[in-house]
Amino acid sequence: MSPHAAPPLSPLSPPVPLGARLLAVHPQPAVRAHLAQVLGAAGHRVQTAASADEALRLLAGQSTTEPVMAVVGDLLQPEVTRPLSAVAALRSRFGSVEVLLLADEPSVELATEALRLGVRDYLFAPVTAEELTRAVAQVLGLAPTQRPTGAASPTVLVVEDEAPLRHLLTEVLTAEGYTVLPAADGESALSLMQAAAQPVDLALLDLMMPTIGGLELFGQLRAINPELRALLCTAFSDRSQVDAFLASGGLGVVKKPFQLTLLLTQVRQALGPRAVARLAS
């Protein structure tokens, strides 16, 4: 989504019955109008704001009989020391309001901090109408989800050397019903694989790690469990390493910073219908 012009609309998902009241925020009028058009076409009632400060004022004066359920848009304040200060204030003052951030520039640090503040997802331009409406539906709990109700849930090994990101992935995947084994490095991951009470179904492997990188680690993990499925997580575009990972049996690449809706979709696709069915069994 360009900050200078509203892109053409893609085909939309079916309208949501009794859509939610949303607040769309963006400094560019064309993008703000586009957000309102897309979300309105999906069945929601949309109010707009040009800045994070205006959004906070509107939330403070909102009706208690029909409150805003989610804020969607650009709440970043790059001109201040803490660009996410408005997000922190919104989450502190209006904890029941969900937040879906849109940003023009990917940033692992900002995305991780935003999600730790309670932002439900963090999308990067360009975003299609289909992606936006799907993300909003999931943020509002209108998209179908599955949770484990008895059978052992799929086990996901998360190997990430950055502690905040590792903790975040663990929290998100656990909340979705997966059994998560977090590891800070390759050696810890190998130990967890060997000691796991049940077979590990999927590994999320950071490409760039000290001692053992994700590509080398995948080979060592496969020596323990030849059926292991894996996704490679990276902020870099090293085509040779990605090609080598895929050639050795890897299933795909998850780009950092993560978009949670996309990440969870990739995890489900990588696990396949048999493993995912255990979430609903």
Image (cartoon, rainbow, N blue to C red):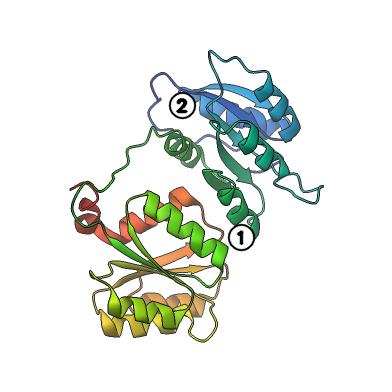
Residue beneath the point at 72% across and 35% down? 52
Q: Is residue 96 left or right of residue 279?
A: right
Query: What's the amino acid at mark 2?
Result: Ala
Mark 2 or mark 1, which is nearer to you?
1
Q: Position of residue 15 (x, y in %)?
A: 40, 25
Upstream in the sequence, badge 2 or badge 1?
A: 2
Q: For this rendering, which residue is in front, 82 or 75?
A: 82
Return the mark for residue 42: 2
Q: Amino acid at mark 1?
A: Val
Q: Residue at x 47, y 42 (%)?
A: 131
- Residue 97 location (% of width, % of height): 55, 31
Percent coordinates x, y for residue 96 in the rendering: 53, 31
Comparing 187 with 41, the one in front is 187
Q: Which mark is residue 137?
A: none
SS category of the residue bearing label 1 = helix
State the image quarter where residue 231 is shown. bottom left
Which mark, residue 108?
1
Q: Decide if residue 6 is in sight here.
A: no
